[in-house]
Amino acid sequence: MTRVRRLLRGAVLAPGGLLDPGWVRIEGELIAGLGAGVPAPAPGELLEEVDGLVLPGLVDLHCHGGGGGSFSDAQPDSARRAAEFHRRAGTTTLWASLVTAPVEELVASLAMLRELVADGLIAGVHLEGPFLSARRCGAQNPAHLLAPDRRVLARLLEAGEGTVRMVTLAPELPGALELVGDVVAAGALAAVGHTDATYEQTRAAIDAGASVATHLYNGMRPLHHRDPGPVVALANDAGVRCELIADGHHLHPAILEATTRCLGSDRTFLVTDAISAAGMPEGRYRLGGLDVEVSGGSAHLVGGGSLAGSTITAFDGLAFARRQAGLPLARAVGLAAVTPGRLAGGPQSGTLVPGARADLVACSRELERRAVMIGGAWLNDRARD
Ligand SMILES: [Zn+2]
């Protein structure tokens, strides 16, 4: 089989900045080179003009579903629908997040998601629970929260067979710090979230190895100048990377701008926290056995009022960060692709560099998405999308 060779010409967001005009050369599945200027195609090379920007494929490390599909209900068709929906929308690397559920259900979901990892549809799994604070559980089902239990954690990690890449837990719960150690020893990231921890309790978790803040600000004790809590403990530690939800409902755009400017795009990254309702009509949905009402672009627990994830794609988050929060393009792409790509590792790096898998998004300069490429092949008809 001959490998398709393509030359894309457009404004290319390279690690060092925007190459405008620029080009990317693709051979088979991989990026072969990139640079500034308007080169002619080599013999046998397909020339493709991108009238706009060529960005790295986006990376979403916290996502529960989309397009009517969910990762959480152990249904393979539903999970595949969710993964396909986000891929078509520009997310080329995705970790599927599981909300709190009975342990047997989590084990079944993990077994099902292993197949999606093996097929390359998702890159890993994030366990958001069940060791979370009942006071800060948000839209997590409080009936299934558990006290930290090393045997339960071991069972879940075992069920994932190496696909569990991150575990969110509340460090103030008795025994939680031991679990942080177990998560790190298993090669996964320990994340602090859905927590009522004090500043000191959060510091202890970081000292034990926690290195990610699960949707910083949301689902945690709020920042107060005499009670800095988890927000300041996580933000102040250079070894911690902080998720931010850029949907316009979870965070004020000024918080998004200020946090990413102060901490830098290598310490902050965007997540969608999307649920099955992303890309779907407004109305009633389910999340972790709870009813969710989607209206006005935001998802709330029915009766409870708590925000219940988002209805955005990673590309929507990028566009919000750029347009509503006013972030410079390079910082916004750093948050949406480069930094989470570094956390995810592997060949899908979230960065346009020679040797990386050719995952990219073609869009207008106003960030209207046109086409998505994964592994050197366009997913959707460029004229259609
Ligand atoms: Zn979540």
Image (cartoon, helix red, strand yellow):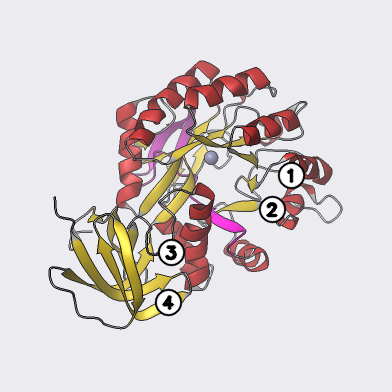
Q: Quadrant of the C terminus?
A: bottom left
Q: Which residue is mark 4?
A: 18
| Amino acid residing under circle 1 | Ile
Vertical position of residue 98 compared to residue 13: above or below: above
Mark closer to the chain start, 2 or 3: 2
Q: Mark 2, mark 3: which one is toward the viewer?
A: 2
State the separation of the CA atoms marked 1 and 2.
8 Å
Judging by the rendered image, the residue that carries numbered circle 1 is: 206
Q: Secondary structure at mark 2?
A: loop
Q: Which residues are magenta?
A: 265-293
Contact, CB < 8 Å: mark 1 with mark 2?
yes
Number of numbered discs visible in the structure rendering: 4
One can see residue 128 in this view: yes
Sequence-wise, the earlier of marks 1 and 3 is: 1
**Residue at x 45% of width, y 26% of height:** 110
Residue type for callout 2: Gly
**Residue 50, horizontal then vertical, whole percent:** 25, 72
- Ranked by sequence position, the earlier of labels 1 and 2 is 1
Asked whether, in this view, residue 212 is left or right of residue 351, the answer is right
Nearest the viewer among 88 and 339 is 339
Residue named by callout 3: 319
Q: Is residue 102 magenta?
A: no
x, y percent for residue 323: 47, 69
| Three-letter amino acid code at the position of disc 3 | Ala
Cα–Cα gap, marks 4 and 2: 28 Å
In the image, residue 38 sits, relative to residue 167, either above or below, namely below
